[in-house]
Amino acid sequence: MNEFSKPLICIMGPTASGKTALAVELVQRFPFEIISVDSAMIYRDMDIGTAKPDAATLAMAPHALIDFLDPAESYSAARFVKDAEREIARIEAAGRWPLLVGGTGLYFRALGEGLARMPDADEEVRARLTDWMAAEGLAALHARLTEVDPQAGARIHPNDPQRILRALEVYELTGEPISRIQAKEMSEPRRPLLKLVVAPEDRAVLHERIALRFHQMMEQGLLAEVERLYQRADLHPNLPSVRAVGYRQLWQYLSGEGALDEAVERGIIATRQYAKRQFTWLRKESSAQWLGGEPGSVMQNALAVLGSAEFLQ
């Protein structure tokens, strides 16, 4: 098997499924080094609500691509691919194996299948569209998107400012609907992915874990963490960082929307909905190998898959 065709090993799964625990244990058995594939762990000062590994875990199993971006900044799948490929090259140059771990499907797909050739972000265009949104509301932008790109207008939720803004930005920069550009030839994928999915068979088990973990996060100081972000003048509810599950609901509470216990319940519900979307994406991954959800069997199944992998021999 040549170097280019050697697959990248990926640990995928919905939130709270046990991906990190499996990855850390694998690092103790193989010369792996973890690269995070998580669109929330990238942000600094967002530790508790993103379930970022603690210092002891990071000492045993360092994670690349976590805790490096300010919450006021934006990030993209294209930038993730560049950052991930840099880390992959670094790890392999040191004679180790990259282990990509996370639940952000868009990032995995971009790395494995390539990206449509989109224009880079344009600050001037984005600022103009953001001003328009502030003046006339998000509904006006979504109506404009539906007018110039009906397919994207139907696909993108009317309450998703990040994707609406990006779609309109692409249209203004290229004169082409973003859906047409996405349908064109994709860039070449870097190399294949060996996809291992950690997920309990019983969805109710995952729901219980999500609720338990959210309450534990609250005990660990999640509200204080969100409050520190809330006090920053440069952060607002439309930023991807603030819209992360858990953060958004507690931000709303700090803005005077409802009681704290209601915000906690909304956070748990939003996390379960996010997990449902992750399951939907994972079920479409036809080449993925499902490892189950119980810690003992997950490791046993993972070792069976990795033990049969040609390039690990």
Image (cartoon, helix red, strand yellow):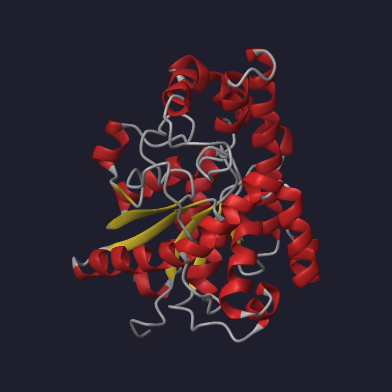
Outermost residue, front side: 135
Nearest the viewer among 203 and 214 is: 214
Q: How many numbered discs?
A: 0
Nearest the viewer among 274 and 297 is: 274
Residue 291 in view (yes/no): no
Question: What residue appears at the point 48 percent right and 26 percent down from the top-left corner?
Answer: 230
Q: Position of residue 239 (x, y in %)?
A: 53, 44
Question: What residue appears at the point 44 percent right and 78 percent down from the top-left corner?
Answer: 191
Question: What residue appears at the point 74 percent right and 67 percent down from the top-left corner?
Answer: 152
Res 93 quadrant in image? bottom left
Question: What residue appears at the point 79 percent right and 65 percent down from the top-left corner?
Answer: 146
Direction from residue 145 to residue 229 in the image, left or right: left
* The N terminus: image quadrant: bottom left
Res 294 quadrant in image? top right
Q: Position of residue 308 (x, y in %)?
A: 46, 68
Outermost residue, left side: 94
Q: Position of residue 171 (x, y in %)?
A: 63, 73
Direction from residue 130 to residue 307 in the image, left or right: left
Residue 246, above or below 265:
below
* The C terminus: image quadrant: bottom left
Direction from residue 194 to residue 68 in the image, left or right: left
Residue 193, above or below 265:
below
Residue 87, above or below 269:
below
Residue 289 in view (yes/no): yes
Q: Position of residue 32 (x, y in %)?
A: 31, 57
Direction from residue 28 to residue 283 in the image, left or right: right
